[in-house]
Amino acid sequence: MQKFFKDAKEHALRDAPKETCGIVVDNIYYPCVNISDTPKDNFAIHPKDYLKIRSKGIFQYIVHSHPEGGDASEPDKKACKASKIPWYVYLIPQDEWQIINP
Ligand SMILES: [Zn+2]
């Protein structure tokens, strides 16, 4: 298993009960600040993080956590589609990863 899963999981556990988010480039996880007004239920990547990480290379995956578990939501699937790259969702209570594809 790639190290980015471990790093993303640690970030998720550290910031729970808020959702965490990050971007993977070249199999490296870059944690982002969640600027959502409702961070326990949603995430929004800080634009500064987005720009900073874009300079590292091509985005492989968008990653976020679900502190209360539960499958990827409809808004997740829509946003994944719009991003045109796969997303990983970490479900904290199940200690499981889900992938959604655009
Ligand atoms: Zn979600």
Image (cartoon, rainbow, N blue to C red):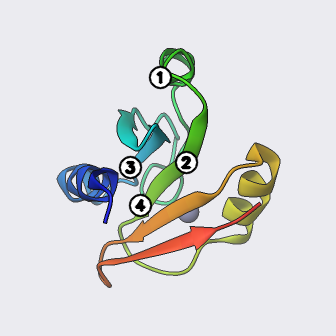
Q: Position of residue 14 (x, y in %)?
A: 18, 51
Q: Which mark is residue 49?
A: 1
Which label lies toward us, 4 or 2?
2
Q: Quick check: 26 left or right of 95? A: right
Residue count near mark 1 (Cα–Cα under 10 Å), binned few <14, some 14–19, many ≥20: some
Q: How far apart, in angstroms, are the residues tagged by discs 4 and 2?
A: 11 Å
The residue that appears at 31% across and 52% down in the rendered structure is 8
The residue that appears at 51% across and 74% down in the rendered structure is 98
The residue labelled by disc 3 is 20
Q: Which mark is residue 28?
A: none
Q: Earlier in the sequence, mark 2 or mark 1?
A: 1
Q: Earlier in the sequence, mark 3 or mark 1?
A: 3
Which label lies toward us, 2 or 3?
2
Pointers 2 and 3 in contact (CB under 8 A)? Answer: no
Residue count near mark 4 (Cα–Cα under 10 Å), binned few <14, some 14–19, many ≥20: many
Amino acid carrying label 2: it is Ile
Q: Quick check: 82 left or right of 50? A: right
The residue labelled by disc 2 is 62
Q: Earlier in the sequence, mark 2 or mark 3?
A: 3
- The quadrant of the image that shows the C terminus is bottom right
Q: Nearer the viewer, residue 24 or 70?
A: 24
Amino acid carrying label 1: it is Asp
Pointers 4 and 3 in contact (CB under 8 A)? Answer: yes
Helix, strand or loop at label 4? It is strand
Q: How far apart, in angstroms, are the residues tagged by discs 4 and 3?
A: 5 Å
Q: Quick check: 47 left or right of 21? A: right
Q: How far apart, in angstroms, are the residues tagged by discs 1 and 4?
A: 17 Å
The residue that appears at 80% across and 56% down in the rendered structure is 81
Helix, strand or loop at label 3? It is loop
Q: Earlier in the sequence, mark 1 or mark 4?
A: 1
Residue count near mark 2 (Cα–Cα under 10 Å), binned few <14, some 14–19, many ≥20: many
Pointers 1 and 4 in contact (CB under 8 A)? Answer: no
